[in-house]
Image (cartoon, rainbow, N blue to C red):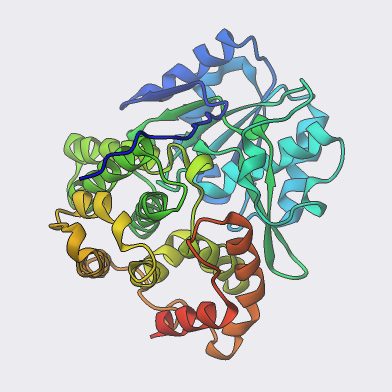
Amino acid sequence: MEVSAPVGEFSFTKLERVIFGPGKVEALGKELERRKLGRAVVVTGKTLGKSKLLDRVTAAMGSRCAAVYKGAAQHVPAHTVRELTAQMKRVDADCVISFGGGSPIDTAKVAAASILSNRDATSSASGIDFSGGLSGGDGRDVIHLAVPTTLSAGEYTPVGGVTDESTLIKGGVVDPRLQPRTVINDPALSVETPDWLWIATGMRALDHAVEAIYSIRHQMLTDALAAKSIALLIEHLPASIKTAGDVSLAHRGNCQMAAWFSIFGGMNTRFGVSHALGHQIGPKWDVPHGVTSCITMPHVMRFMADIAPQRFGPIAEGLGVKFDLANARAAALECADRVQKFIAQFDVPHTLKDAGVKRNEIPEIAEPVHSEIEHAKVVDRPVNREEIVALLESAYQ
């Protein structure tokens, strides 16, 4: 058997520290003190904005909490970013703290981009160019600390998504300075996250891991962590909502590790067709991104089984599927079936029809999906619009 030496390079983001464990939100004040930050704005949504969990976050910050913005919303409508930007300017914020899931995290990122560029970043958001997240910047900074309550893993990237409210098309802002510098994973802060949202974002993490592995840009490091992520989610995600108390916190903590591992190195591997579909299904039909992964992932896995079955080995490892390189396609298809069965046990939408998508409107997102896939260059061959529509049709029912 011929053996080749690994060749390539791996670039890191500006993430500096991950603090994890029950009760670790108390470290937030020390992080602000260590960084000499004194005017922090907390960003969260309406539900957490009414929760006593928010009090735990602000109490940990003490006098360093300059304001709380509670308007973050699903898919990050542009007007919410503008509101947050204005509030950060009013208090002369030197730090933004996102508390919640992907929506407050991305709202914070795009608002920081507006302040750093001294212009409305929502108007310049375009197709997501992951390469822009690993270099650049002019020395100025708005420090972002993240306290996530879902498994979306947006806290581990320097990419912020925002939706144009007139077109319902989602674009992205990418800058290395948008990367949260510290992530605090406290499973005790996830206890009020609705089960459907916890599960759906867990599927988003699973989607990150799967697409990192079969990306043409995959690497040994990312393969290893993504395979571990898959195994952790298979073991701990169902148990995290079926148990209570300290047992549930233990399972939730392991799920948080899985979310981190799923996207470690994502700026290097980038993500594929399932993510591109989700980026447009979400804002077009108001479907949460975790739910889009529940729907699209098995179909895209079967699509990729015909293109790059030889790269499914780490996916099979995480799922406990026997993988024979000589019969890689069969194993890859078994992986897709196993993922579909895993998703089926949860009370989440499993088809686009279930999610309220109008079938006659499906072709309308083919162009932006196609553009993202072409730009990402993670698939071995070009993917045409007809194939994109066919995938959406297969996911409809």
Q: Who is closer to the viewer here, 179 or 254?
A: 179
- Residue at image position (53%, 26%) is 15
Q: Residue furthest bottom?
A: 360
**Residue furthest front in the image:** 2
Vertical position of residue 190 compared to residue 234: above or below: above
Residue 233: where, in percent of width, then height? 26, 48
x, y (%) of residue 203?
36, 57
Q: Work out whether 290 lies above or below 360.
A: above
The C terminus, quarter of image: bottom left
Q: How many marks?
A: 0
Residue 153 appears in the picture as rendered: yes
Is residue 343 or residue 224 the one in the foreground? Answer: 224
Q: Indicate the position of residue 16 as horizontal and vertical percent values.
A: 51, 21
Outermost residue on the right side: it is 119
Point out the image quarter for the N terminus: top left
Above or below, 198 against 88 in this view is below
Q: Residue sitting at 26 percent across and 49 percent down? A: 314
Where residue 184 sits in the image (x, y, percent)?
A: 44, 28
The quarter holding residue 64 reads top right
